[in-house]
Amino acid sequence: MFMFRNCAVLLVIGSACCFIFGLFNLHAEVEPNACRMTYMFGAPMYARVQVEGGDHYPNYGLYYYYEGVKQPLDPLKSRMTGAPVIFVPGNAGSYKQVRSLGSVALRKGRDNDAGIHLDYYTIDYDEELSALYGGYLPRQQNFLKLCIRTILSIYEGRADKPSIVLIGHSMGGKLAQSVLTDPEIGQHINTIISISTPLDQPVLNLDSELEAFYWQTDTALDKVRTATVPTSTTNVCDSLHQKPPSVQRMANQESSARLDNVLLISTGGGNRDLLVRPGLTSSRFNDLHAMTSAIPRVSLSCDHLSAVWCLQFMQAINRFLFRMAHLRDDRSSVVFGTNKQRNLQSALHSFVKPRRRQQSYSRLGFNSGSWHEERRLVINKYFANGLKGTYLELISLHRQERYKKMAIEALNVDDADWLFGCSAEKHDGTGHLYCDKVTSLMHLVQRLPNEDRDPRSVAILDLHNLRRTYLEWTHVVVRLPPGNRRIGYNLDIYDPKDRIMDIKMPRWYTMAKLPLVNETLQGTLHLRLRISGLLDPYQSLRINVEPLQCLQPEYRVTARLCVPWAAGFERFQILKSADQKPQLFANVPTLVPRHYNTTLNPVTLDLYLDPICRYRISYEYSYTSALSRLVLEFYGWLPAHFACVLLIVLRKQVETFHEVGTFRSLRPYVGYLQYTSLFVVTACRLLKKLILTSGFLPEPEPLDYSINVSIIIHCAAIALSLIATLATWLALTLYGNAFYRLALRLTTLSQTTSNVIVSIVTHLPITYGVLTIATAMGTCSGVGLLLAFIFYFLMLSNAYKDYLEDFLWQKAANLVKGKLKPSAPVKAVKPEDASSEEEEGQEDKNLIAANEDEAEEEEPEPCVGLQNFSFHVTLLLMLLIQLLLNAPTTLAWLRSRHHGIVLPDPGLYPSIVVLASLSLLLQLRAPQKCAGYWVLSIVFYFLAGVVLLYCQAAVYRINFVFAGAFALLAAHQTLWMLIRRLS
């Protein structure tokens, strides 16, 4: 048992250190911000648009964006001819965030010879914290509907059925998606683009209003829109363009559900966005998802705020909108096209890969350039000063049977057609081979991100497939256009068995670096790594690509990561110089679907190497990246595990009573040095399976992650409970007066008044409950809890100081008495006095025995009421958690009361239960030493399990569990007092 306890202590310390290490290394995979700032060409202007019915929303507004016009503009009185776009800001977002999108669109519209332009509108939500408090969302949704109706009234005269594009950032994307639940509004929505939006679940589920909004939206969309979820056979990596199943379905059949004609596009910022992690940015209702690092001409990661001003990303969005828009037949105005399949192709072209239609053939001819032929397996040709004329290279398709793959890379060819297939023939005059008729292969070419260096365009061709498909073909043609820039191409023909390597994800306890390739061949262009066993979002594999020998000091390696069950999460990473650490990371954004076989459908990592170098490639488990991802993915579980620890500690404290006047009674951490709660973590996993099998209880949260995650988070919660306890003890001991003065300033009460209130509350605690409950019902739950916490803290601080003072005086008095007490003289016993001494000794023995009997009858006085400090410190921490969970509601109430707006208070009822129970416990001087605590102990075990099963994702449910714990404590103490009085 001693050995097990030591192991448990080491486990808690080690796991807490891992969590802290991950917290301090959150930027382990974060790349530098490569976004360019968007600058306006004129002063940004916002014209307010009067919204019909907007009087009920005095703090909201609708604005039209324009630039460089001094005179005010009113869209209701002007003739608007552009295609309407509405920008919906998110959590704490400003309506002015539209200026980057709007400015790029204005500039593109002025430079557009076709006369296409856009009208950007934006909504002012008063920068409300809609991600933290769900009570805002229904009001914001209703106002968005009013804005859509207002804009439709502006444009309805020019078209039979005007359509609008919605662009939502953060929570604005969820609001934009939610308006589809109204069929009258949904029929006028053309496209919805969400930017870094948690679509199917919130980042933190802090109140029931937020959960209800998500549930209502998703339930309604299930009825009007087709959902697509990954299955055990999904593999989007088989497609070159990563088309999700919904896109493939749309290409083959007509829309089935009513709102399938609305195009839904979601985008994620990548590893720089630490607020909304990538796995939350996709939705099962989407038609297309893309990460900014994989969007053509963007190829970078955006943090949560830069996603609305990053120039490269703003240009990509507007390019897509301009592709969708067209002039009406009378050329009087611009409208968005309503053909969803055509719009979807435009979206694929803009957000996934520039699509090129495979042409039947075209002509080059012998005089179209300088023709050359190469039959080598590896070719590296560069023209440092460019070319004066077109350079054409013929590469034979007829190779040895084992050479099945051909990797071709062209540098600095931009968007020109440079790769073709053909049947070569000899020129009559010179005898040189050339191709007259060629077929473009540009649909097989992928442009790789290369930052500011030479653009890389790569094609991986299957030679056997080309020969079987095009029987007459003999060669592949590479065409390099003339110019002054450095240009060239690389060729690598290889056997796939030598370049495709299978990796099994190492276990977390594997410390070694595992070799993969000792040294690549010079000229190697492409390697593919297939990784099996990469299942959880927190797992991370580090691939080391070390250049051994390079012809130039700088090199470039581009890695493309594809997750087979997560469409649209393609990710690119770049290594470019010797100063940079030669490491790449492989991880997945979402948990693998159930029964998914990653051996058959592995995660693939394509390495596009620089052929000027030889490389050593190895791999290892990345602890730094894994721990940082664990913190980023699962920090939301910490409140539930912290609550579980407090309940287990409270179970121990309610049956532990120390003697008054002992050092143990002063310790605030009684019960916190425990590892019993770890048993609850493991037991809950077994209980979850039992609940799912039996079905007699509500289904627990579907969090099917490794138990390692739960252990680390729970041990971090144990460490946090110790830190919180010691901090509370120090605050009670040293800073009670400081908190008292701070409370005086906040409440603007005089010291005399406050002393009277504190005295009344201390001596008659039932007034404590009446005052705080009345405050909670008159204002909001958070204000009542704050007032209760202040009074409780001051009461406990005063009681602890008084007890400590009495304790020290008593110890000093005992010490003084011990020094001043004279020692009894020892008399020499004479022989003649022996009989009398024996009689006196017998009398002394009888007296001592009588005193011992009296001492046994007098039991030591236990610490009850506020003297049981460890018990009340735990209740104070539980009250603090309740207060923090209701803090967003309090902020919402403070902001809304200026406008006379009444918002729902989802935490009111559990807060009233907590306040009433706490006042009753103080009135009864709880805890009292009584029977029945074993029942409470069992109930607290049950409540701790409920927290872990039902409150890790839905954090707000902790309010109800704590309310139940407080109510049970109060009921137990009340029943015992009644029974004692009756008996």
Image (tube, helix red, strand yellow):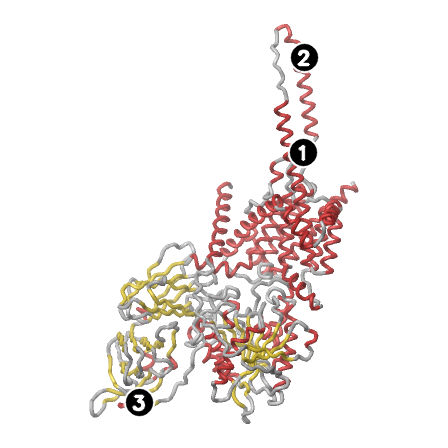
Callout 3 secondary element: loop
At horizontal 41% and vertical 85% (from top left) the residue drawn is 357
Judging by the rendered image, the residue that carries numbered circle 3 is 364
Q: Which of the two residues, 970 or 152, is positioned nearer the viewer here?
A: 152
Q: Residues within 10 Å of mark 2 (few under 14, many from 20)?
A: few
Please determine whether, in this image, residue 765 is positioned above or below residue 282: above
Judging by the rendered image, the residue that carries numbered circle 2 is 839
Q: Quadrant of the C terminus?
A: top right
Amino acid type for the residue under numbered disc 1: Pro
Amino acid type for the residue under numbered disc 3: Leu
Q: Is residue 775 visible?
A: yes
| Mark toward the viewer: 3 or 1 | 3
Callout 2 secondary element: helix
Spatial distance from mark 3 to mark 2, Cα to Cα?
A: 135 Å
Q: Earlier in the sequence, mark 3 or mark 2?
A: 3
* 712 relative to 521 in the view: left or right: right
Please determine whether, in this image, residue 286 is positioned above or below residue 858: below
Expressed as whole percent of the image width and height from the top left, the position of residue 242 reads 44, 75
Q: Which of the two residues, 972 or 193, is positioned nearer the viewer here?
A: 193
| Residue projecting furthest to the left | 430
Judging by the rendered image, the residue that carries numbered circle 1 is 860
Spatial distance from mark 3 to mark 1, Cα to Cα?
A: 105 Å
| Residue projecting furthest to the bottom | 330
Tell me where residue 421 sits by quadrant: bottom left
Amino acid type for the residue under numbered disc 2: Glu
Q: Which of the two residues, 812 or 287, is positioned nearer the viewer here?
A: 812
Per the rendering, the mark at residue 933 is: none
Expressed as whole percent of the image width and height from the top left, the position of residue 395 reads 27, 81
Q: Earlier in the sequence, mark 2 or mark 1?
A: 2
Q: Which of the two residues, 723 or 703, is positioned nearer the viewer here?
A: 723
Callout 1 secondary element: loop
Q: Are marks 3 and 1 in contact (CB under 8 Å)?
A: no
